[in-house]
């Protein structure tokens, strides 16, 4: 059973930074793509960032490119999202996500995601 547990959310002022962590368990972590999505109130869940199983390839939503950085530590079974220059529009619940297919790139379509964490709230005040 794949389990994803996020941490690191909180309240921050605009322009500030937060680092989200996601600890994975239940299977061999290093062979699966990982990513982050977010969902603001009354909005659809949207893609934020993804990282390949090896960590060599990353993708970002245009809205966070240049401000957010996704990384992973396969020795710690963890994936991270460093968020800098935060804006009020970044306010959302952030979800860690992964796929059931090894070596596949994580889809940016939330309908195609197989496993989700419980989410962590990020609130950016203006």
Image (spheres, rainbow, N blue to C red):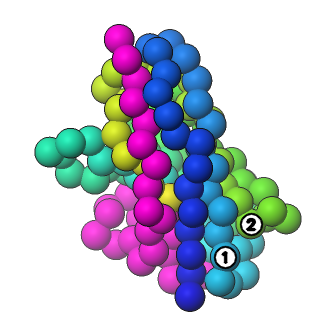
User: Which of the two labelled residues, at mark 2 and mark 1, occupies the earlier sequence position?
Assistant: 1
Q: Quadrant of the N terminus?
A: bottom right
Q: Nearer the viewer, residue 57 or 3?
A: 3
The residue located at (42%, 43%) in the rendering is 121
Q: Are marks 2 and 1 in contact (CB under 8 Å)?
A: yes
Residue at 65% over, 83% down = 26
Most extreme residue toward the left is 42
Q: Kindly identify the residue that appears in the image at 51 percent across and 83 percent down.
A: 100
Q: Is 69 drawn above or below residue 47 in the view shown? A: above
- Judge whether 114 appears above or below 16 on screen: below
Q: Is residue 77 left or right of residue 43?
A: right
Q: Quadrant location of residue 124?
A: top left
Q: Is residue 25 above or below residue 7?
A: below
Q: Is residue 105 visible?
A: no
User: Which residue is label 1 attached to?
Assistant: 25
Q: Label 2 belongs to which residue?
A: 77
């Amino acid at each position: 059973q794949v389990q994803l547990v996020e941490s690191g959310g909180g309240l921050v002022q605009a322009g500030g930074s937060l680092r989200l962590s996601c600890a994975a368990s239940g299977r061999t972590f290093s062979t699966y793509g990982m990513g982050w999505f977010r969902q603001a109130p009354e909005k659809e869940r949207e893609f934020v960032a993804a990282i390949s199983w090896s960590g060599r390839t990353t993708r970002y939503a245009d809205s966070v490119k240049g401000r957010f950085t996704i990384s992973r530590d396969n020795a710690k079974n963890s994936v991270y999202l460093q968020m800098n220059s935060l804006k009020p529009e970044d306010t959302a619940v952030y979800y860690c996500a992964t796929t059931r297919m090894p070596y596949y790139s994580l889809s940016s379509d939330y309908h195609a995601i197989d496993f989700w964490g419980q989410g962590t709230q990020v609130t950016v005040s203006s």
